[in-house]
Amino acid sequence: MTPNTLLLDVLAGRPVDRTPVWLMRQAGRILPEYRQLRASLRDFKELVESPAAAAEATLQPVDHLGVDAAIVFSDILTVPEGLGLLYEMVPGFGPRFPKVIERPSDILELRSAQEAADQLEYVYGAVAESRKRLAGRVPLIGFAGAPWTIFCYMIEGQGSKTFSKARKWLRQYPHESAALLERIAETTSIYLYRQIDAGAQVVQLFDSWAGVLSEDLYREFALPASIAALSPLGQTGVPRIHFAKGIGGHTLETCGVEAYGVDWTTSARRARAAYGPGVVLQGNLDPSALYGTPESVGRLTTQMLYDFGPNHIANLGHGVYPDTELDSVKAFIAAVKAHRPEPIVCA
Amino acid sequence: MTPNTLLLDVLAGRPVDRTPVWLMRQAGRILPEYRQLRASLRDFKELVESPAAAAEATLQPVDHLGVDAAIVFSDILTVPEGLGLLYEMVPGFGPRFPKVIERPSDILELRSAQEAADQLEYVYGAVAESRKRLAGRVPLIGFAGAPWTIFCYMIEGQGSKTFSKARKWLRQYPHESAALLERIAETTSIYLYRQIDAGAQVVQLFDSWAGVLSEDLYREFALPASIAALSPLGQTGVPRIHFAKGIGGHTLETCGVEAYGVDWTTSARRARAAYGPGVVLQGNLDPSALYGTPESVGRLTTQMLYDFGPNHIANLGHGVYPDTELDSVKAFIAAVKAHRPEPIVCA
């Protein structure tokens, strides 16, 4: 069996025969095999914290969907947990932290970055076990939440439409906010380094709540913290993908890593024009496009591939919705695999 | 007393001495006078449905903040109520519709556009009473939710982070979705026409959930429905403001009305460059900026005024958050009033 290195090739700027494809949240409720695995366990956290079970979930989309990359099955909320804030996953509601950061002095009670990263051995175990089971079939992606997104959960304790409490912190306690973001960034850096050490061949940072920030706050707090998390990993040679959701209204620009995720509310044409043709971009089909017929999924996917052109990793613009039909997911993957870029004609 | 016509002047392209200013949600919990009025009534809906009480709330920010415009105190959910779906305002949760549109055949049970608009006499009463009490001091703005945003609530029955059920409708029932949007648009058109007839001097359409749509769905469904709602009002001569929140990643362009709202996640410089210097833009200070000190509010407001330049209506990029300090709101208004554009020097 020839190893599928499409993702690593695109990230390294090597020529490829076709665009690689994977989906955010590809391991999850869309797969009957996942629902079966999940039903055999107590709860979501048991799945995340058991390396064998997490590795099984990690490999399912490779086996059953034929994607070009695996991403370790885990959660972005492991980092606040490592720092000392335990989370619960409440069915039908989402994550909730019984204890949050209420005032600046609460930061003093958090663990150090090194101690926090040391709490997360189960993630490194899941990475190692996944890599072993993949046996080189496709590359393995490790990931973490971006510091700003983790900061949101640590302040608010749960999801929010506006995250206005977290934004209030940035405005009212700018120095303490920067200090907390720095602690999270340092933890994230060690955390991703340990994932690489355990076998992750690519790492992705998810800034899921970047889109609630104005340009000034994004540039002052969120972006520098993401750079602080990713920059030290440059020496490993492992490619880094930065995915800041919702920044299409201002900063579509490079920040020193190997690839950039694009969400579905930023048009592919605008992203390509803003970043330039040589930058590797990942995304961005509207997850709701997979509610359409397989024919329309194919048509919209092909359009997206033309809009991005070369230096592209095909993906959705956000995680796949849990009620998506499996046939639509397969139509998306098939459309990418069938697509061949137009040959360059020398006149 | 000289009537303050700054807002009407900017919208008509007449020269002004300074930029007009008002705030979305300026009538509300930030004002002690509002909290007192609200406490004297049974609930939020009694306030919306009583023309005298609504007019009192409408005038409070004119009296106590010195803004350059009043906006009638009401709610965007009056239109689905007119169509036949009653809503409840659940304290600490937000709006909720016990009955929603679940399948295409449910559309048949809705009222016609004319019948729906006829249900909303209390809004026209609030507009008339507000206009009378204003006695020409500042212009009065009427408003409605944009068809796509109303569609979201009619399908989902409450707020949502992704409105994926509503987006699923667009993908699975494109014809029925267009028909429902058309019914909402026609209702909205009559509704705004009746507000103008009762005394509204400007109308604004709020597309609060435009930002969950990809460019293709926005162009195919949301934007045409907004145009269908606003276009017939052109003959009245009353200026129209279209505020689609979250479209900064794709369509910053004119659609035939007199002014465009800009949200806080789209940079003022990008918006001005995209629309061009001659288009009237409204916005867009980050509401969280008002959590800062009065000095920082002043600095950020002045920066925004420079970034937009002429043809600008100063506002926040979204409704003011209810826990905002009154002094910060006043600092925002004062900074706009103190600002004089740089004189044009002829060399």
Image (cartoon, coloured by chain):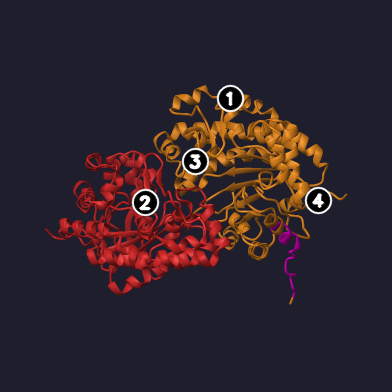
Chain colours: A orange, B red
Which residue in the structure is indicated by mark 4?
A: A4
Distance Cα–Cα, label 3 vs label 4: 38 Å
Up/down of B11 relative to A329, above or below: below
**Rendered image: mark on residue B267:** none
Residue type for callout 4: Asn
**Which residues, given as a range, are shown in magenta?**
A332-346
**Rendered image: mark on residue A112:** 1
Distance Cα–Cα, label 4 vs label 1: 39 Å
Q: Residue at x 47, y 46 (%)?
A: A212
Residue A139: name its quadrant. top right
Judging from the image, mark 3 belongs to the subunit labelled: A
Q: Nearer the viewer, mark 2 or mark 4?
A: 4
Residue B118 place in picture, x, y as percent: 30, 64
Up/down of A131 relative to A66, above or below: above
Residue type for callout 1: Ser
Element class at badge 3? helix
State yes or no: discs 2 and 3 in contact (Cβ < 8 Å): no
Q: Earlier in the sequence, mark 3 or mark 4?
A: 4
Q: Does residue A213 appear in the picture of this structure?
A: yes
Residue A71 place in picture, x, y as percent: 70, 43
Dot 4 surroundings within 10 Å: few (below 14), some, or many (20 or more)?
A: some
Which residue in the structure is indicated by mark 2?
A: B303
Residue reaching furthest to the right: A1
Residue type for callout 2: Gln
